[in-house]
Every structure is written in structure tokens, then in C-alpha cells.
Amino acid sequence: MEVTAVILAGGKGTRFVPFVTNKTMWPIGGESLLEHTIHMVQSAGIHNIIVVANEQNESFLKGYQSVSPNLQYRLQNDALGMDDALGSIADLISKKPILVLNAVDMIEINCIKRMLDHIASHKPHLMVCGMRTESYVPAMGYYSFEGEKVHGVVEKPTRGKEPSRIIRMVADYFQSPDQLISLFSQFTNPDAQDMRYELAQDVLLKQYGADIEYTSYWSKLKYPHYVLNVMDTFFAHRLKPYIHPSASVAPNAVLDGKVYVDAHARIDAYAVVKGPAYVGKYVTIGNHSLVRHSMIENNSIIGFASEVARSYVGPECLLHHAFVGDSVLEKNINMSWGTVTTNLRLDGKQVRCKLPDNTYIETNRNKLGALISEGVFLGSNVSTMPGVCVAPHTKVLPNSTLR
């Protein structure tokens, strides 16, 4: 029986502030993360796909159905977790073997192929995907083992209490999804509300055990600064050097290393792009600008003498003689002449991310610039301190410093 891919894309991303773009529709290399996930399962050989969607990605899915008739979607009215997502499509999947995936996870494509090959030959009740880690990863699930089989999952253990060195990915195969769904109602404790899927999976793992496949890479869009993690994963494993025939690269511009230049992009005289780098459709890299280890999405302009280093610049952003370091610009952002995103603390400590409501999250990064949401206008000579988040449509006066 053919496996159906179930892609979970109904979440609201409440931990993704200050950004307003739904995480599933966040562009990476010219395509949304949801598109990347759909293409991944299709290239692995899965034809039938069900997406649990939200209002932000519904219009994209309507259009995508015209080129992929085996794709279905259903809106998740309230983002109440993975158990609610599967429950909302129970009538579509109860009798079908399914592979559950998160829309915002980037994992090895060949891992999915290997899982499908193993499922076809061994016909297991369950199968999971994991990644080995030598250091503790907070806020993650860890698998427990009996021999070589997975026999449980421990959600978010404290450091030193991990049952193994294998962290849990969401690439979960269920031969009989109705067994999983029937278990959700057993967990009525309010403290279990966000973990009913994992608790039900743990019951089945203890009952049947599960074969496991290992992914060689993984990145997840969870917090705003994780955009840089996903970008780096894309660069390391999916980016290929390429110049589209419609792109224009000046004879005295320099492309150094693994650089992808998309359709109708323009790289002007004496500009330098050092890979890994992605230059999106209709992007302009102006004279004497430097782009290194960065992603510039569609229709953005990196104006004269600007430098973009280890950063993500979203669609329709405008820079003029600016420095953007270790930062994330969502979309439609204007950075006027002399704007600087500082990215290193004077005391050398790791940068905390300061959210618009003046709360903080730890980033575990020694370098982090600004996280700037859509529609922001920064006047000339504005400086942002490390880890600052700028709320949507903010207008910042010239010569200001954001702390």
C-alpha cells in the first residue's frame, strides 16, 4: 500500500515574533519552506500528499493543486497541536499508512527515500527518523532504545538526563494511523495538552518498537534567529553554483565560490559575491557592494557600497551604503545611507535576542545583529545593537541607536 505524506503546516508560529510571515511561507532560496517540503517528498517518490494548512498558506496550496492534483489540504481552524492536526484529517488517513512531516523542518532528502525503501521491504508498524548529537540540544525530544529499536521518546529532558544521543525528528511512519489517533483522548491532563501526539507515539513505541533511519542534517524554523540556521543548512546541503541565462553579471564583478544567481538578477561593476550565497530573482547587487555567506531574496536591492555578511535579506528590501551583519531582514525594509547592524557584544558574551515586548531569549550565538520585521524604515545613520528585534512597520529617525 502506498504511503501518504501528511505535512503539518497549520501552526501560527507564536514564538516567531517579531516576524509576521507565517513560518511555512518563509522563503529560502526563492521557495517557501512548505514548497521545499512538498518537493522533498515528491522527489522521494511519494505521490499522495495531505497538508494540514492555515489561512496564510491556503492561497498557495490552492494554486499548487493545479500542478499537483494528488495534493489535498484541509484548514486547521485552531492551531492546537499535532494531535489536533491529525484529528482534523482522521477521515482521510485512518486506513492509510502515513509519513508525518513538519513543513518547517529541513532534513536530508535521501533519508526519506531510505525510509520508504525500508518500509516497502520490511513493512514495520512504526518507523522514525533521528539525528545523532554529541552535545546537549535543549527543548528537543530524545529517543530511548532497546537494542537497535526505538522503544520510547522523552520530551525535553534536562541536561544529563537524555536517554540516548539521538534527538527526535518529525518524520514518523504509522502503518495504522487510527491506532495513534485513538490514543489522543487518553491524555486529559492539561499539562499534556501540547504533547498528546508525542505521548501517544510513546505508547506505540513501547508496544511495537520502531526501526529508525538517521538524517545527516536537520534544521528547524522555530525562533526568529533560527532563520540563519536554516539558511546555513540550505547552503551546506542544497545550494548549487548556477547563473541563470537571464541574469546579468558585469565583466568586472566577482563571483567567488558556490553562488546561485537566479533569473533576471543583476550584479553590477566591481560588486563581489562570495559563496555560499543566493541572489534571488530580480535582485540588484550594486556597484562596489560585497555580499558574503548571505541570502538575498527576490526583488531586493543591495545598493552602492553596501556589505551583507552572514545574513538573510528578504524580498523587496532596499539597502544603500549599509552594513548588515549576522542579521535577518524579513521583507520590504528600507535601510538608508549609513545604517549599521552591530553584531558583537563589547564584553564578548553570547548575544540575547531582545523582543519588541522587552523580553529576552537566549540565542547561543556569539554574533547576532538585528532581527527586523516587515515594512520597517530606518533613517540614515541608524545603528542597531546586537540582538535587537524591530517591530513591523516601525519608522526610525536618522542618527538613532536601537538598544
Image (cartoon, helix red, strand yellow):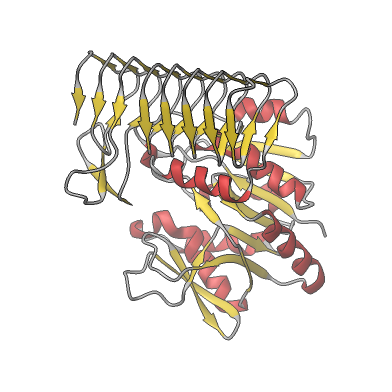
Q: Nearer the viewer, residue 77 or 18?
A: 18
Residue 50 percent location from the top left of the image: 68, 43
State which quarter of the image contains the N terminus.
bottom right
368 relative position to 3: left or right: left
State which quarter of the image contains the C terminus.
top left
Residue 292 percent location from the top left of the image: 48, 36
When asked about the image quadrant of residue 136, the answer is bottom left
Q: Nearer the viewer, residue 100 or 280?
A: 280
206 relative position to 71: left or right: left
For the point 38% across and 39% down, which residue is it?
A: 326
Residue 204 percent location from the top left of the image: 58, 71
312 shown above or below 123: above
For the point 47% across and 21% down, which residue is it?
A: 288
Res 214 seen here: yes
Q: Nearer the viewer, residue 312 or 141?
A: 312
Res 80 seen here: no
363 shown above or below 207: above
Residue 338 percent location from the top left of the image: 30, 19
Q: Residue furthest left?
A: 347
